[in-house]
Image (spheres, helix red, strand yellow):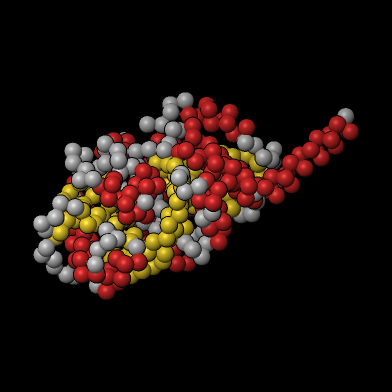
Amino acid sequence: MCNQSFENKRIEFSKQIEISPHISIKTHDSISVDQLFDHYYSVGFIYPEKKERIDPFIKLIKSNWKAAWQMGKDIAWTLVFEDKNTGRTGTVTLWRTTNNSWFAQHLTSSGCPVGVCSVLLESQAQAILGNYKSGQNWYCPLNSYAKKIYGSIVSSIGDNYSSCDLFHYLDMDFFTRIPHTNNVEIVRVRNDNHYNIFEFAQKNRGRIYAEAEELNDSDIELITLDNLYKQVGLRRKRYIWMAFLKGSDKPKGAIIVYRGPLGMNFSWLENRCDLIIDKSLDEDNLETITYALVKQAIEAYKNETLNIKYPLTYFTIVADESSARFLKFIGARQTREYHQSIWLDEGFKAWSRHIKKIYARVIEKYSKEKTHNKKSTKKRQ
């Protein structure tokens, strides 16, 4: 759970990182979900393709956001900045994806770089004070602004505490005919038997990913987090299956299925599947393991006992290039590529320095303005 004295500390910390006296930062308490979404449309954050994707489910999505906001920084919160001189505004939203990690998304602005800088620093400050263990952001390679902020973190923080990897993002229909496999054994990973999922993920997707997704945590099924979401009528679960070739005791693949309130992320990343395959597999076994795991994953979306409204007829898979090839062969549609940018708590302060470095000229400009205004005030006195 987050630190209970979080709110009081937040105000004090904000004063320490203040860049401009003209910028005020507020939480989502200052706006409604409808106002936030109106802002998304007005600044072009919800562009035509995204609008087509989410509009059929917009009522459910807004309902999920309203519920999540009730828990504030325990589940989801939005920070809003406003430039008092120009009226320009912007936002960033954060939500808890695992027991101790958060997801940063939806960085928007109607124009005001110093406001963007301030709200980014404030979001990281809140993560520090909330005792979170990692943060992550997903962005498309064509998003140059996000790439500048989140894509360059490894050069600033170092690869001991951060990573930024590219994956294929695919949609697969539930009724897809997936080839049958005979020589694969699938096992469910649970809190009482992890089947070395952390070691496997670390080897094949990297230590930063494995730690950030808390695959070494005792509550690997996210039962504690689910109980938190339940308090406002939502759910958050994680299902993991691992694949073994029959006759072998070494895992060759894993699929990690996240379930949550639809639309917490507009690309459905809250309900994604992470497909991880042993890099040493030959082509035949790679194909077999891929199909066996994806077929198993569908069960996580058919579990009616979860009470998660999921009106989609497809699910999303995040995979590397090798697995994506086979998924496309059976009809999966690749809609985009995504970079997953991750930073661990040991790199939180370095992340803040990274942001200040990116906005150094903006900070310098406003510092000069502040100094000039103070001198002008003294002269008038």
**On the rendered image, what quadrant is the N terminus found in?**
top left
User: Which image quadrant: the C terminus?
Assistant: top right
Query: x and y percent of residue 352 in the render?
Result: 56, 42
**Rendering coords of residue 29 (x, y %):** 50, 38
On the image, which quarter does residue 243 sit in?
A: bottom left
Q: Position of residue 143 (x, y in %)?
A: 52, 62
Residue at image x 52%, y 26%?
A: 8
Q: Nearer the viewer, residue 286 or 369?
A: 286
Q: Is residue 348 visible?
A: yes
Nearest the camera: 20 or 128? 128
Q: How many marks?
A: 0
> Residue shown at 45%/33% (left/top)?
130
Q: Quadrant of residue 366?
A: top right
Instruction: Left or right? Give the position of 84 relative to 338.
Output: right
Most foreground residue, 68 or 151 = 151
Figure quadrant of residue 102: top left
Rendered view: 29 above or below 38? above
| Residue 299 visible at all | no
**Residue at x-position 17% and y-position 56%:** 244
Q: Is residue 139 above or below residue 227?
A: below
x, y percent for residue 234:
31, 43
Image height of 329 relative to 118, above or below: below
In the displayed structure image, the side of residue 315 where residue 378 appears, left or right: right
Side of 39 relative to 238 (left or right): right
Residue located 44% across and 63% down the image: 50
